[in-house]
Image (spheres, rainbow, N blue to C red):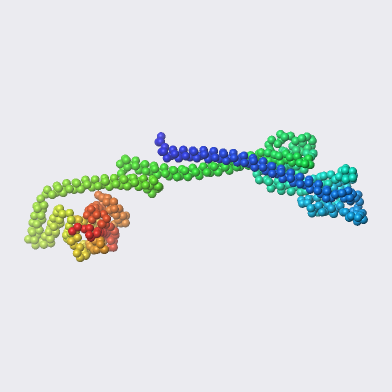
């Protein structure tokens, strides 16, 4: 089994640590949220208890004040009692005859202006079955035969005391809309649905706020009321609650179901868990994507080094997908491999050159004078026979041979052009009327010193690769001119030319000084290029290749005039 890389082990370790840390953090946040929810629900219960108690106590206080406003003395009580016992017309006439006019229904009407949220009053006397009813629709009230249905209202009651005997004269009932309490409860409902029961002193439910979550508690309260037994405290174990006994003997119960609290906390748990899971996925994605890409780059570098170790010295690290320090390392390795490759090629070239030197030494053992004398004999024989054209050809070939065998390393531009001209002449003799040439040399440039065999390989490339002997307009041109301080030698032809791909390959080989032994044109150009770089130095010398204006091939050599040696 292949061992995991260090980077992959680190990624897996960091991933495990990341998951554990986020899970622990999620649990801690969930626990803190649970405690916060419980505290918040208890605060909600406390606030509802406080406000409902305050409102209930406020209405009890208001009812006492209303009794004092209606019956401040015995005369007002007598007026109210007369209203019950008389027809309204007789009662009204009676009140007009008194020194101080007092009208009980008018006094009741004024209460609506002094106190808010009053829906109505009911007054009953103990000595009679008659009742008095006042509502917002009929503020002065009337004496109905039966009490209207006020079961949909919250009712507060107090006794009316006879000041003469200090005995109860009757009762007054104040009723208000349940929406007053509903508004209070809903305003404080911030976390879970509250449960509110306001019980009378006898245990009857006077008001309730129950959205279905308090049905069990409601049934228990009803059962206890019917059996007249006290509330069992065990029923409250499933609730967070407050149980308060008010000043009038009524009991206020405000509760919140623990199941509702759990469900709210559970929704928080689910949200935190989902958020934590999402965060884990995102962080793991970023982690594996970032470090995974880094691991891929490292493996690419290692793979390339392994292939180089096995002998593939031409392999290079792909740097397009490398980043930061790996890019720097990859570039450094590639440069090192390039240097090694160049060193290997230099050694190889040195071996080739050494073999060439050995071959030349072997060839030099043949007496050159024997060759010259033989060629001279052939030339003279052709002259004697009247074959002057053959004599010229033999003479030209002999001159070329002498130039090739001579050991000079440099020559002048004029001698190099003369040598090239003889070379072209021999080809013209082989293919008459098919090849033309032109030498366009600026004045005073004939004596410029250049390395020997600078132009001949370029001309030879044309005859090997570019000339088309089926045409009669083959032409090659050598132009020498000056531009600023640079001398330019341009060799151009109208031959077959090269494709853009081949041209790009030749340029790359010139730039890298790379020999292609399978491509004679490349070898000749690179050889001339290398010798000229040594002769003129890299900074002062350039060789450029391109398509000629006539569709053929073009070589441009340029160098600084002052640096050339004469």
- In the image, residue 482 lies at what x, y percent? 24, 63
Left or right side of 30 for 546: left
Q: Nearer the viewer, residue 10 or 296?
A: 10
- Residue farthest toward the left in the current orientation of the protein: 384
Quarter of the image where one finds residue 486: bottom left
- Residue farthest toward the bottom in the current orientation of the protein: 443
Left or right side of 445 for 74: right
- In the image, residue 160 lies at what x, y percent? 85, 45
Please, is residue 386 above or below residue 71 in the view?
Answer: below
Q: Which residue corresponds to the image point at 87% horizontal and 49% vertical from the top-left? A: 73
- In the image, residue 391 lies at what x, y percent? 11, 60
Please, is residue 58 above or below residue 388 in the view?
Answer: above
- In the image, residue 10 lies at what x, y percent? 44, 39
Q: Nearer the viewer, residue 391 or 300?
A: 300
Regarding residue 153, the answer to whether it shows in the image is no
The quarter of the image holding the C terminus is: bottom left
The quarter of the image holding the N terminus is: top left
Q: Nearer the viewer, residue 521 or 280?
A: 280
Q: Which residue corresponds to the image point at 18% horizontal and 48% vertical from the top-left? A: 356
Regarding residue 558, the answer to whether it shows in the image is yes
Q: Which residue corresponds to the image point at 67% horizontal and 45% vertical from the top-left? A: 189
Q: Which residue corresponds to the image point at 28% horizontal and 61% vertical from the top-left? A: 548
Q: Nearer the viewer, residue 110 or 125?
A: 110
Left or right side of 426 for 100: right
Please, is residue 459 above or below residue 342 in the view?
Answer: below
Quarter of the image where one finds residue 7: top left
How many marks on residues? Answer: 0
Left or right side of 516 for 360: left
Quarter of the image where one finds residue 49: top right
């Amino acid at each position: 089994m292949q061992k995991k890389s260090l980077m992959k082990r680190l990624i897996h370790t960091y991933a495990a640590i990341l998951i554990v840390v986020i899970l622990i953090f999620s649990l801690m946040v969930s626990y803190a949220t649970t405690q916060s929810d419980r505290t918040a629900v208890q605060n909600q219960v406390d606030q509802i208890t406080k406000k409902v108690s305050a409102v209930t106590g406020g209405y009890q206080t208001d009812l006492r004040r209303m009794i004092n406003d209606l019956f401040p003395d015995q005369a007002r009580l007598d007026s109210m009692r007369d209203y019950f016992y008389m027809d309204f017309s007789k009662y009204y006439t009676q009140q007009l005859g008194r020194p101080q006019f007092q009208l009980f229904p008018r006094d009741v009407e004024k209460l609506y202006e002094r106190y808010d949220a009053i829906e109505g009053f009911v007054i009953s006397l103990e000595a009679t079955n008659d009742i008095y009813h006042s509502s917002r629709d009929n503020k002065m009230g009337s004496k109905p035969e039966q009490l209207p249905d006020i079961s949909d209202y919250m009712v507060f009651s107090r006794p009316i005391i006879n000041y003469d005997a200090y005995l109860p004269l009757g009762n007054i009932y104040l009723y208000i809309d349940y929406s007053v309490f509903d508004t209070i409860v809903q305003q404080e409902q911030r976390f879970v649905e509250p449960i509110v029961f306001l019980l009378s002193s006898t245990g009857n439910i006077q008001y309730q706020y129950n959205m279905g979550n308090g049905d069990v508690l409601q049934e228990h309260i009803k059962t206890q009321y019917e059996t007249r037994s006290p509330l069992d405290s065990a029923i409250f174990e499933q609730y967070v609650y407050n149980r308060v006994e008010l000043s009038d003997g009524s009991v206020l119960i405000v509760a919140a179901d623990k199941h509702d609290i759990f469900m709210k906390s559970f929704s928080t748990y689910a949200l935190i868990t989902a958020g934590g899971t999402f965060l884990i996925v995102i962080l793991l994605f970023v982690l594996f994507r970032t470090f995974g890409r880094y691991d891929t780059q490292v493996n690419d570098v290692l793979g390339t080094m392994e292939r180089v170790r096995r002998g593939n010295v031409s392999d290079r690290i792909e740097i397009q997908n490398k980043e930061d320090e790996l890019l720097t390392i990859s570039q450094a390795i590639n440069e090192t491999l390039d240097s090694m490759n160049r060193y290997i090629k230099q050694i190889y070239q040195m071996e080739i050159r050494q073999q060439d030197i050995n071959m030349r030494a072997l060839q030099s053992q043949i007496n050159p004078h024997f060759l010259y004398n033989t060629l001279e004999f052939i030339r003279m024989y052709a002259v004697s026979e009247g074959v002057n054209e053959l004599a010229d050809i033999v003479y030209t070939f002999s001159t070329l041979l002498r130039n090739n065998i001579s050991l000079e390393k440099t020559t002048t531009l004029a001698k190099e052009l003369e040598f090239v001209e003889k070379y072209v002449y021999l080809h013209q003799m082989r293919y008459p009327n098919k090849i033309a040439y032109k030498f366009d040399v600026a004045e005073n440039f004939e004596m410029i010193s250049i390395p020997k065999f600078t132009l001949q390989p370029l001309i030879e490339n044309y005859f090997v690769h570019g000339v088309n002997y089926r045409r009669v307009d083959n032409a090659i041109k050598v132009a020498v001119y000056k531009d600023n301080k640079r001398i330019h030698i341009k060799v151009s032809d109208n031959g077959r030319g090269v494709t853009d791909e081949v041209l790009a390959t030749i340029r790359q080989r010139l730039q890298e000084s790379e020999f292609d032994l399978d491509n004679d044109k490349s070898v000749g150009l690179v050889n001339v290029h290398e010798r000229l770089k040594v002769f003129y130095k890299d900074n002062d010398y350039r060789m450029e290749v391109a398509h000629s204006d006539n569709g053929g091939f073009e070589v441009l050599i340029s160098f600084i005039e002052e640096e050339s040696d004469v």
